[in-house]
Amino acid sequence: MNKLIAAAVLLVIAVGCQRASTDAAPAPAPAASGSSSAAAPSFETATYKLEIEPIGAYKKGEAATFRVVLRTKGEFHVNEEYPTKFKASDTPAVRFAAAQLGRADHPEAFKAVPCASGKDNCTLELTVGFTPQESGKVRLGGEMSIGVCNKDNCIFDKKTLEREVPVS
């Protein structure tokens, strides 16, 4: 039964990567890495850019937000079927509104932006709520699980994002 469920999930993900196109076939995408890397404020590959963007000024004890933004490149688009999620880093300096934000559980936190062609979505913005518990330099971040596809390939990845921000 578990094998049947796993096969069905893989089929749904693969179908989510399909896109009708009459364009010439682009070069194959690099293989999916599926690996986490050392924490950084942004990651850029041949197929996407992922980064943390602070929003406004931050004050200790006041509710605030930051964005995690995924921008695809070239013929790639956001895989709508992939269970994109953000798992907040546990730190005493920050209290997150939710420890984990997934598209299925918190769709209001995600905003999809269509590609220039009007087909698919090329940008995905996630708004993360938090309250700084300390003043000074505070680290915001967490692990983001993403999926991007072109008409031939899907790439699934996890990256640990972290950015230091000033809190007054």
Image (cartoon, grey):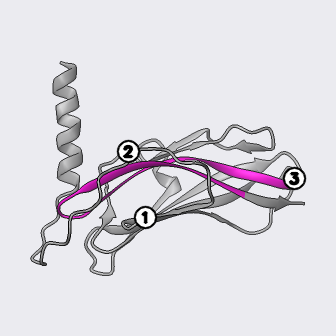
Q: Can residue 112 be seen by looking at this rendering?
A: no
Q: Residues within 10 Å of mark 3 (few under 14, many from 20)?
A: some
Query: Mark 2 falls on what kind of element?
Result: loop
Q: Which residue is mark 3?
A: 60
Q: Amino acid at mark 3?
A: Lys
The secondary element bearing badge 1 is classed as: loop
User: Are there few (<14), some (14-19), or many (20+) residues within 10 Å of tag 2?
Assistant: some
Q: Residue furthest bottom?
A: 116
Along the polypeptide, which appears first: circle 1 or circle 3? Answer: 1
Alpha-carbon span between mark 1 and mark 3: 35 Å
- Examine the rendered structure and indicate whether residue 136 appears above or below residue 56: above
Query: What residue is drawn where x is 43% and y is 64%?
Result: 45
Outermost residue on the top side: it is: 1
Point out the stretch of residues depicted in magenta.
Answer: 137-163
Q: Is residue 63 left or right of residue 48?
A: right
Between marks 1 and 3 in the image, the one whose residue lies nearer the viewer: 1
Which circle's residue, 3 or 2, is located before the other in the chain?
Answer: 3
Q: In the rendered image, which quarter contains the C terminus?
A: bottom right
Residue 86, position as x, y percentages in the image: 53, 46
Q: Which residue is mark 1?
A: 45
Residue under the image location 12 percent in, 77 percent down: 24
Say which of marks 2 and 1 sits in front: 1
